Amino acid sequence: MDYRRVKRILFVSVFMNFVFISLQKKEEVLLDMVASGAELGWLTSPVEHGWEIGQRAVNGSLLYNYYICNVEEREQDNWLRTTFIQRHPTASRVFVELRFVVRDCNSFNADSLICKETFNLYASEADADIGTAFRKGLFRKVATIAPDEISSLGEMKMNIETKVVDNLSRKGFYLAFQDIGACVAIYSVRVYYKTCPATVKSLAEFPETVAGGENQALREVAGSCVSNAVSEDQPRIYCTTDGEWVVPVSQCQCRPGFEAMNDACQECQSGFFKSSVSSEACKPCPKNTQPSGHGATSCTCMDGFYRATEDPKTAVCSGLPSAPQSLVATTAQMSIGRLQLSWRPPADTGGRSDITYTVVCERCEGRACQPCGEKVRLDPSNTDLKETRVTVSELEPHLNYTFTVEARSGVSQFSNKRATSSINTALHYTDPPKVTAMHLVDSSSTSLSLQWSVSHRSKPVATRYELMYRKKENDEEIANGKVTTYTVLVLEKNLVQISDLSPSTVYLFKVQALSPEGNPGSYSLEQEFSTLPQASQKTGNTAVVLGAAIGGGVMLFIVVVVLLLRKRRRNSHTRQGPEDAYFSSPDQLKPLKTYVDPHTYEDPNTAVLKFASEIHPSHITKQKVIGAGEFGEVYRGILKAPSRKETAVAIKTLKPGYTEKQRQDFLSEASIMGQFSHQNIIRLEGVVTKFKHAMIVTEYMENGALDKYLKDHDGEMSSFQLVGMLRGIAAGMKYLSDMSYVHRDLAARNILVNSNLECKVSDFGLSRVLEDDPEGTYTTSGGKIPIRWTSPEAIAYRKFTSASDVWSFGIVMWEVMAFGERPYWDMSNHEVMKAINEAFRLPAPMDCPSAVYQLMLQCWLQDRSKRPRFGDIVSILDKLLKSPDSLKAIADFDPRVSIRLPSTSGSDGSPFRSVAEWLESIKMSQYSENFSIAGIVSMEQVLQMKSEDIRNIGVRLPGHLKRIAYSILGLKDQTSTLSVFAV
Ligand code: AMP
């Protein structure tokens, strides 16, 4: 056999089939036999009869290979050594990829012991090229190279093996192939190391990095943020021995004015901005800013718009607020040098919610104005007011004042423009004169005539006086804890004769002047005067108070307050401890003509004492909780005052942990209620103020709140009874309006019903409209208003008057006639206000007498001056009650204007699934059977029904008939949303 010929055939054919595989990206090639082409210059040993070089032209290129095939000769040791391969300084690990063919020993008749099918790979490190000086002993074996497949004659099975030469440290190395008797041809030797290529991950750049070797499997690499990105910590990543990046750690984020895009930070486009280092995208410039240029970090405000100092750069720019609106000075409290300024927030807030107000007070004489100075007090403050009102006190009478209210916001400081409203006002009130000295004019055994003088810095004014006197207890009486009685007289003149006194008795008197507006001055010193002994009676015994006659005037009225004081002696002084006092209010207490706002009292506790009687808690027994008030539980209980019969009472309590302000607010209800005395106003029995647990005790109303009572007795009362109840409420309201008291929260829930079905107006707390009522809804001006019950003008600009109470009364009429139905059903407050403004009104409730409904409509006239007064309402209702026939005509209902019952679909808004479900929703379940017996089992059938059909199936009661018929009309008109119709 000619082995050389065999060899040639083998190598050429293999080469023809060789497909060159392109280099991988991550590999840095140090040696490539194929690419080197011509002169490889590899060393062979022995030089003769060892490895040989072959060549072949493929597609016009000459390619080389090394082969050997000494299969029949013993002890072969043929070496083929590469040229010196420079190592990359950080590549301690290189890969050697071999492509080779090995001939099957069986292809030859060779001795199997001599013929081999493997060869060996060796490596030797050096710091310099040692040229041809080849010493086997310097090489270390890397691997035995065994083919996966051996080739028979004529076959070309290419093997590809990759071996790793690791732990390299010197400048370069040689590779060598040792043949020990195989028939082998090497087609390609490629030596390379791997790198992790330069990369950008999470806005961090990492350089190309040579993959580590065995001793450093994961190479940590530090990176840096791409341009215009920053990070607190240096970004890090690891390069694996396979040249792959793993575990990038980067917190790089684009700088202000830049956003991340395609692994880079790019400038924000014009019209966009980014104000901080963040991973967010640029945002469009906010409202009222100028369009920004490229890379903007903020957008500048347009002229006339600003950002407050504390606003972030990202905030919209706001304009200046406009002036406060509807500035008014309320003069109700003017008599004591006070007035209340109130206004509405500016129409334009400039888009800000931090509106505050500054009030400037100036005193004007002619055109010359000067600041009011510190004497005039503005409460709570004159600057930074969040509320739209301020109480001004310590004003001088008869002077002109100008109040300027400025609306300010966080941006006002940036402009010189001022948004102000001004009002001029003068106080024409009179100081109550000071009572200077009281002296005895005349006396008898049973009477004393007294006179006193007053000092007044201005002209004498018509004035009234409040005189208080009591018997002076002797020591024995004091020791026995004797009860003392105070009597209070309101007088028109500065003299009085008091009769029916005991002979030889010392009385203590003090007097206070009241200004014409009813405000009290300070009390005079308490002075003693005694009656004469029985025998030396000088004047006849008069059983009446004649002071007025003496003075030529008329006594305005007599207020008798019986003040029972149990006194105890302590260290020879008498002292009144809180637990010792007991006040009881007599039934004959008559109301003053005008309601006095407890706020006019500097100290609200004075007002409580003035208008309410103190009850000792030991006289009160709580029985059962009957309700929850704003300040605490409401109990039913018993009041047993000495020498009075037991009375059922309601006891309102103040829950523990209250603040002084809450206590005063709680007690203010008693201060108000205590001024009223009317059959239809809830009666105050008294208060407990001198003990920790403050209480308000009122008459007990067995049937509780009216709205609940009506709901519980739906359909059980006649129109006559309902109108009777309304008459009572109207009478109570007439009384209140006569006293100039505006209730503001008149609603069925605030009317109480006793066992005789008498209705009484309740709920008088000062804060009640603001805080207490669950119906209260915040308006834009900040107050809380029960929208459904409140007149348009009160909602719009807080114009609360008796006329607005009349509107509420109309709603109460509707609630009553509809048996506690919720006004406007499930319409939202917004829908209600919209409907009212569009002149829609509630429709007549079922079975409502036409005359009653007409009265409701009168109460709901837009023009408040056209609404009836409570006096008119009482007369109209009285007339209706006197001729019950007038209640027979039932208000008409016009289906064309879209009345429908609120329930025209299931609770979830879907159509009713069954007739039963529908009947239940309109509270007519009792007719379920009538419907099913008549074969009406689907809602489709229901929709076909006419009034006659409803009557024919057995619905006879007109109210029920109507309710069902209206509901069917509503069901047919699902598109209509308003349950109201136009007046
Ligand atoms: P108010 O804090 O006045 O709204 O009272 C809360 C609840 O207590 C009311 O809704 C009534 O149910 C009940 N209530 C209040 N006062 C009385 C009273 N004088 N008689 C009977 N129940 C009352």
Image (cartoon, rainbow, N blue to C red):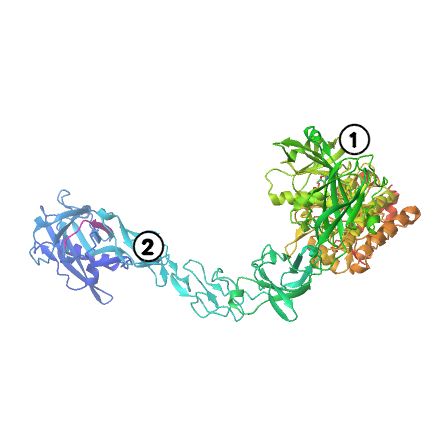
Q: Which mark is residue 504?
A: none
Is 166 inside the magenta-drawn segment?
yes
Front in this rendered view, residue 649 or 434? 434
| The quarter of the displayed image where residue 759 is located | top right
Is 290 inside the magenta-drawn segment?
no
Q: In which quarter of the image is ligand 1?
A: top right
The picture places residue 458, in percent across and down from the top left corner, at: 70, 59
Q: Name the residue under label 1.
A: 645
- The kind of residue tagged 2 is Pro
Q: Residue 235 carries which label?
A: 2
The residue that appears at 42% across and 65% down in the rendered structure is: 257
* Secondary-structure class at tag 2: loop
Q: Which of marks 1 and 2 is nearer the N terminus?
A: 2
From this viewpoint, is residue 247 visible? yes
- The kind of residue tagged 1 is Lys
| The quarter of the displayed image where residue 866 is located | bottom right
The picture places residue 607, in percent across and down from the top left corner, at: 69, 45
The residue that appears at 60% across and 43% down in the rendered structure is: 660
* Secondary-structure class at tag 1: loop
Q: Is residue 263 left or right of residue 448?
A: left
Q: Are marks 1 and 2 in contact (CB under 8 Å)?
A: no
Q: Are there few (<14), some (14-19), or many (20+) residues within 10 Å of tag 2?
A: many
